[in-house]
Amino acid sequence: MHNTYVGRFAPSPSGQLHFGSLVTAVASYLDAKHHGGKWLLRMEDIDEPRCIAGIDKDILVTLEAHGLHWDDAVIYQSQQHTRYQAVLDALINEGRAYRCTCTRKQIKAMGGVYDGRCRDKSSATLLAIDEENSAIRLKLDTQLEAFNDVIMGVVEPQPVHVQNGSHHALTNPAIYGSQQAEDVVLKRRDGLFSYNLVVILDDVFQHVNHVIRGCDLIDVTPLQRAVYQALGYDAPEYGHIPVAAVAPGRKLSKQNRAAPVDNKTPIENIVRVMNFLGFSFPNAAAFDDVNTVLTEAISLWNRKKVVKTPEIIVPQHESTYYNEPL
């Protein structure tokens, strides 16, 4: 792992940046710059059917309007398939990954957690499996472990069900039983590489060693750390910040039509982010431009002062879901 701090912001171009994503962008930027590090930008467009043409450019414009200038070139996951596939091929050839034909219905019948039934199929059986009807899973022979979150403190593994490359918190912890890591999907049945593979390969590729992101991803972090270990990489330090929500359990997101950030009020937006995160911060009128507000924010940044709560409720006008006529 490199000694120099390398952080990143990795938005998905499936919608314009909203207040919640701006909070993550600002927090990750401030943590990097406060520690004299680099701040990289990655477009997580691996799930291409969900991405919207031109949104990546909108995201870049919004970041620049807020003075959040990234280091190095922006990388796009959609342009990294050859690198991902090379890793997958090597894992399969080494017997560390395998094809799985289990459907969602079958996994539901297992109790909601994949039980590893495809991992010991013979080579002949594997060769006969139709690639188009199978996922690729990584063998994980490890327990999920607690980790020290640089913002939230010690985080114990929570029951997480990983399916089709995405992550879902289980509503019934009893289903999970022991905290044995589930063999994680690396490539989905539909042929798309999974988030839990590419996020790790890209962070390793970009030498990222510090990740500041929203608490909506905190439960999947022990699993991702287990994948790092299985692949032979050092996991970065993680810090999770509160997510903005319009109601308990309803975080601001593209899915619930969160309102886009207003690029005409960058100073006010950054001040609001600092207040949201729990900092005593001057009013917008105290700053002449966006660079002075960021300089102040960098100097005041302190992980210990960030609010230690998974989510914070913001006004409902942040989601257009509430603004539309009945």
Image (cartoon, rainbow, N blue to C red):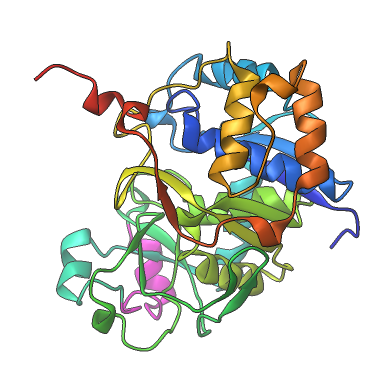
Q: Is 36 positioned to the left or the right of 128 in the image?
A: right
Q: Over which residues does the magenta segment extend?
A: 115-129
Report the residue at 18% width, 68% height from top. Answer: 108
Q: Does the image show residue 260?
A: yes
* Rendering coords of residue 174 (x, y %): 25, 84
Q: Position of residue 24 (x, y in %)?
A: 58, 42
Q: How many marks?
A: 0
Which of the image's four quarters has the N terminus? Answer: bottom right
Left or right of 207, for residue 166:
left
Location of the C terminus (image quadrant)? top left
Residue 80 in sight: no
Q: From this view, report whether residue 144 is shown above or below residue 231.
A: below
Q: Say which quarter of the image contains residue 299.
A: top right
Q: Residue at x 37, y 77 (%)?
A: 121
Q: Is residue 183 left or right of residue 58?
A: left
> Where is residue 126 shown, x and y percent of the image?
39, 67
- Residue 128 lies in the magenta stretch: yes
From the image, give the main secondary structure of the stretch colored magenta. Answer: loop
Position of 305 relative to 296 (above/below): below
Closer to the camera, 37 or 119?
Answer: 37
Q: Is residue 97 above or below residue 22?
A: below
| Relative image position of residue 158 (x, y in whole percent) | 41, 75
Say if 186 sits above or below 319 in the image.
below
Using the rendered view, name the quadrant where residue 170 is placed: bottom left
Outermost top residue: 264
State the residue lying farthest toward the left: 326
Is residue 102 within the magenta segment?
Answer: no
> Residue at the location (58% across, 26% down)?
269
Going 31% across and 73% down the picture, which residue do you hit?
114
- Left or right: 33, with 103 as reference point: right
* Residue that sits furthest to the bottom in the current view: 178
